Structure formats: structure tokens, C-alpha cells
Image (cartoon, rainbow, N blue to C red):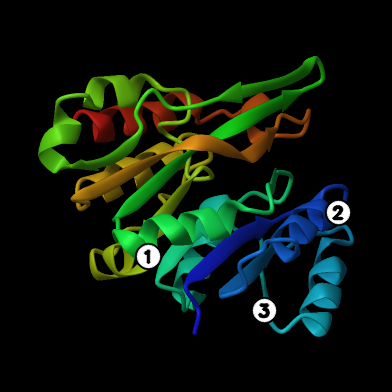
Amino acid sequence: MVDFSIIVPVYQAERYLERLINSVLAQDYTRYELILIDDGSQDRSGEICDAFSARYPKIRTVHKNNGGVSSARNEGIRNAKGQYIFFWDADDYYDSTFLRDVFCVLENNPQDICVCGYYLETKTGTEKILSKLNGAYNRKTLSNVFSEFAKESSFNSVCNKVFRADIIKENHIEFPQQKIAEDGIFVCRYLQKADKFYFMNKAYYHYCQNDGSAVHKFCETRWQDENNYLKERSA
């Protein structure tokens, strides 16, 4: 039985990939699958994925032609077998108690989405960032504080959230084919279908800002991509 599907798009990530995979293997909760989507990498990323898949039955590798992070995550959704889905990035990592703590929340009171805090790791140091919200909300109670949630720096990120697989699949929610703000559009579309929300007052996710991250790269479609996101938020 698989409770959690962890989907990781992999592209030119050989410098960080083993750290992320080892942080998954170190989890003290074991009913998960790790789906590595090799998005046409030209470095050793694909070989690393295959090596771990050959050694650990919980790890599956899917190789595909390069199509971008949205294409890779959507492929992961199609392959996911778990009741809940995580979207993790290859250059980040997670604390070992994350899956166990999420399971404890969901076991006692199933939620449509869980949100956790994170650590922002940069060259100058590490900052712990938690949501101002804490505990369980329904659609009505969240609406009273939604503006606070929407202001948070991680609102439009999928990496600090866990999603119900059936909501994603039954409503055909996918990541749009764009390079900027695709996470935010996915989150907005998912929130429109969710009714139960839980905010964990603890940080588990280590967001590592690297020079090669997409947020630091020039993107000629940035204006249009971000405009698409703003339209989704106001829908």
C-alpha cells in the first residue's frame, strides 16, 4: 500500500540529486513511492536515478524527452499510485520526520491539503519561515484569513504542500506549460476544489536557492507567465 507519491522532476541535477534522494530514504515513514522524472538530462542525472531505482524498490525512474518542469510533474501525476502527492525539487531536501508527521495529521483527520513551514537556505545563511496560520480550517473559516495566507512567500509553491491525488486526477488539474509561476497556477486551481486545509506549525522543507535555479534565470516569457498567474489568483 502506498500512502504518498513523491514526484521529483530531474534535469541537470547531478550536483544535488543524491542529497534529495537520501533525504527521502532517511524518512522514518515507509509507505511511499519516489518517482524520479528524468526530463532529458544531459549530465549524470539519469544514471543516478537508474542506480537508485535498481537498488530500492520504492524508487521508480521515468525517462522522457526534455519538456520542462511542468511536463515532468504532469508525467509524475500520471504515474502516481499514492493517496497523496508531493512535488519536490531535485536541488532541495527534507527533514527525516516529515512524512511521519504528515501521516499523523492525515490519519486522525483527513485533509485535502497540508501546508508546512520551510527553511530558506542562501549563501548568507538559513532563515526559518512558518505560516501565520496553524491547525485545521474548512472553506468557510479559511476564507476569513485567506488574505493572510495569500500574502505568504510560499503561497504559490507546491514544494511545502501535500495534495490529495483523487482531487488532482478527478478534476484534471495539471501544471500549465510555462516556465514561471506554474506552481502558483496549480495551487490556485487546486484550492478551488479543496474543502479541508491544515497548516503545520513546523518547518521541514529546505529550500536551497542556487545560482542555477529558474528564479534567477532570464525568461523572455516572464511577463506573460506571471500575468497568467495573476489572472488565476483573481478567478
Element marked by disc 2? loop
**Pointer 3 local density, CA inside 10 Å: few below 14, some 14–19, many at least 20:** some
Confirm or deny contact between disc 3 and disc 1 (CB under 8 A): no
Residue in view at x 65 percent, y 34 percent: 214
Q: Is residue 99 left or right of residue 223?
A: right
Instruction: Give the number of the disc on residue 14.
Output: 2
- Asked if 90 appears above or below 62 in the picture, the reply is above
Residue 229 locus on image (x, y percent): 35, 32
Under mark 1, the amino acid is Glu
Q: Is residue 198 left or right of residue 200?
A: left
List the residue tagged with mark 3.
58
Residue in view at x 74 percent, y 45 percent: 91
Residue in view at x 20 percent, y 28 percent: 234
**Pointer 2 local density, CA inside 10 Å: few below 14, some 14–19, many at least 20:** many
In this view of the protein, which residue sits in the foreground, 191 or 235? Answer: 191
Confirm or deny contact between disc 3 and disc 2 (CB under 8 A): no
Residue 87 locus on image (x, y percent): 53, 54
Residue 72 locus on image (x, y percent): 57, 61
Question: Cα distance, mark 3 to mark 1?
Answer: 21 Å
Question: Cα distance, mark 1 to mark 2?
Answer: 36 Å
Element marked by disc 1? helix
**Mark 1 or mark 2: which comes first in sequence?**
2
Instruction: Give the number of the disc on residue 107.
Output: 1
Which quadrant does the C terminus fall into? top left
Confirm or deny contact between disc 1 and disc 2 (CB under 8 A): no
**Mark 3 or mark 1: which comes first in sequence?**
3
Question: Cα distance, mark 3 to mark 2?
Answer: 20 Å
Q: Is residue 113 left or right of residue 137?
A: right
Under mark 2, the amino acid is Glu
Q: Is residue 162 left or right of residue 170?
A: right
